[in-house]
Image (tube, grey):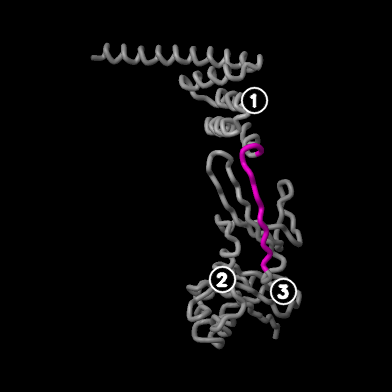
Amino acid sequence: MKKLLLLIFMFICLTAYTQNKKAIKLFDKGVIAFNEKRFKEADSLFALSLKMEPNADTYFNLAAVKNELGDRCGFCENINKSISFGNTDAVALYIKNCIKNDTLYYKNIKEPNVVFYCIKSDHICLKNKFYYVYKEYQEKGQKKSGSFYVDTNMIKVTELISPNCEIEKFFKENMPYSVVEEMPYFPEGDEARIKFITENLVYPAKSKYNNIQGTVYVTFIIEPDGTINDVKILRGIGGGCDEECIRIIKLMPKWIPGKLNGKPVRVQYNLPIKFTLN
């Protein structure tokens, strides 16, 4: 039994080796035919070689042949297969020749400093289409410079927010309202909200030392289920007070959501928080 298994194994190895040698010979002949501009012959030789041993180089060469023969779909298909076999150098070529990108822009009047745009990627001949909606804006933050992080006033932020290019529909369903029939409110009302802030707010030591006082204006979104998202500072006073306001808002329990036509909706809510030293 062991001898039989050994013979089968040797036969498989010998067959693979023989096929490999044949595949290499066919590939070499294909290269010669290509260089001599016998493109139809090269096409057949590369195709036969691939049947015996699929690999990135042969797919890439077959793509070059298809390109010379004016077969754009064949070019894209084989370049894509070359990439799937690990040819990363072919990626840029595929993107340039086999993907058509259309960009649609939409500026929302509720956020004049924010640009929304959709990139529609159409993969030629492969019947693959992808849609991505991005949100682009400026915000305060840090930017990496070499191996160090340096403070900057504003940095550009791009967020992927939806794989759907129906932008008008997207905004209708997802953009928050600023005013609705029933505005959202903190559980048990304004007095409970003020009490929550008073009991949880910690005056930053840096602000105390530098006698920093004033009002921080915070904006955030109250979702249809009452949760709080996207907390940002509209106007701050620095000294750690802005960060403390964000912490307090994120610490809050679920709100009672706003309603439009009796249905809970997303609402943008602005809230002032005062810092006063006695």
Percent position of residue 20, x then y: 47, 15
Structural distance between the alpha carbons of marks 3 and 2: 18 Å
Give the answer, above or below, for where 4 lies relative to 128.
Answer: above
The magenta segment is 96-108
Q: Mark 2 and mark 1: span between their CA atoms?
A: 60 Å
Task: Determine which residue is flagged by label 1.
Answer: 68
Chief secondary structure of the magenta portion: strand
From the viewer's perspective, tell me whether residue 25 is left or right of residue 11: right
Query: What residue sits right under mark 2 in the picture?
Result: 250
Q: Amino acid at mark 3?
A: Arg
Q: What residue did someone put label 3 on?
A: 235
For numbered disc 1, what is the local secondary structure?
Answer: helix
Figure quadrant of residue 74: top right
Sequence order check: which comes first, mark 3 or mark 1?
1
81 in relation to 28, above or below: below
Image quadrant in which the N terminus is located: top left
Q: Is residue 64 above or below residue 12?
A: below
